Each structure stands twice: as structure tokens, then as C-alpha cells.
Image (cartoon, rainbow, N blue to C red):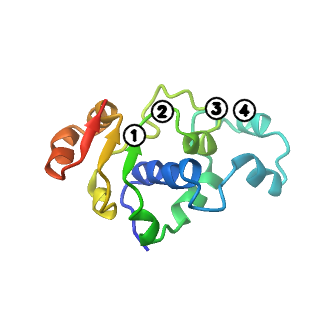
Amino acid sequence: MADFRDFAFKLVVVDKLMYRDKTLTPAFGIEAHMRERGVEDLDDHMEENGLDFTILDEARAYFEALEIPDELLATVDELVFDGGLKVYRECAPVWDGEDDLFDVRSLDDLDLLPNLGVVTGARSLEHMCPGAKDVLAARGITGRH
């Protein structure tokens, strides 16, 4: 099992495998997860506890502990860096995309994806990680804007 160094990078990989490819199962849903913990109205819970623009602790704990088999990581041939990823809505349901909450800080985890060939949102990635364009090019990964 892979050890990710950058939580935000892991979330991008999870989005690809869990919500786009549907190969990492079961899919995590924050509303159902919170209902199991007695929270009936997630919006009210978030507002009452000042959690509007944060990653919910329950989601962070789930995704941090989530193990992704190497065989699944080897299927990742493309990643999308975009503020509208489903995994972000599952972590921070009312996040507006106007801050750096999900910014990738390191590309060290590229080593975990031996078959990655395309990155969509390379301009966004370059903004988060200056020099990303060169790192991708050195690895033979095509960056699309």
C-alpha cells in the first residue's frame, strides 16, 4: 500500500479512482457518513460549528486512513486538477474554491503513479506548485491547461 505525502494530491487520485473510474469502492459520501453519527442536517451542523470552509474532520480521517492498493494506482493514467472535483464536495460540502484549502504542495507522490501520462489542469497545478510544468515534462507527462 502506498503512503502519500501530500493529502491534497491523494484527494486528486481518490477522485479519479473513486468517483470517476469507480474502481476504489465503496464511494465515500459525507452526508450518509454524518447521518450514521447522528447528524441529520449537515448544513446546519456545519454552520452551527463554524465549519463552512474547512475539511470536515470525519472526511479527513476517512481519506487519510484510506489505503489504495498499488494495483489501482497503476491504473491512473490521467489526473485532473480542478476546483470542482467531487472529492472536494465530500470533504468540504460548502467550500467555494476561493482559497488554498485543497492546494497541492508537493509532487513527490507522482512516484506512486507509474502510468500517469496526462495532467489536465496543469496551469492550476503550476500555480500551486511552482516548477510543476518542468517536473511533469521531465517525467514524460503531458500537461493540459
Q: Position of residue 21 (x, y in %)?
A: 54, 52
The first of marks 4 and 2 along the sequence is 4
Determine which residue is flagged by label 4.
47
Residue 21: give its label: none
Q: Nearer the viewer, mark 4 or mark 3?
A: 3
Q: Nearer the viewer, mark 2 or mark 1?
A: 2
Residue drawn 29% across and 50% down?
117
Measure the alpha-carbon separation of dots 3 and 1.
17 Å
The first of marks 2 and 1 along the sequence is 2
The first of marks 2 and 3 along the sequence is 2
SS class, disc 1: loop
Measure the alpha-carbon separation of dots 2 and 3.
12 Å
Say few, some or many: other residues with alpha carbon within 10 Å of mark 2 (under 14 / 14 to 19 / 20 or more).
some
The first of marks 4 and 3 along the sequence is 4
Residue drawn 45% across and 53% down?
13
Q: Amino acid at mark 3?
A: Val
Say few, some or many: other residues with alpha carbon within 10 Å of mark 3 (under 14 / 14 to 19 / 20 or more).
some
Q: Amino acid at mark 2?
A: Gly
| 83 sits left or right of 37 in the view | left
Q: Position of residue 124 (x, y in %)?
A: 33, 32
The first of marks 3 and 1 along the sequence is 3
Question: Are dots 2 and 3 in contact, CB under 8 Å?
Answer: no
SS class, disc 4: helix
Measure the alpha-carbon separation of dots 4 and 2.
22 Å
Q: Position of residue 59 (x, y in %)?
A: 62, 52
Q: Nearer the viewer, mark 2 or mark 3?
A: 2
State which quadrant residue 134 falls in.
Answer: top left
Q: Amino acid at mark 1?
A: Asp
SS class, disc 3: loop
Determine which residue is flagged by label 3.
94
Question: Are dots 4 and 3 in contact, CB under 8 Å?
Answer: no
Determine which residue is flagged by label 1.
103
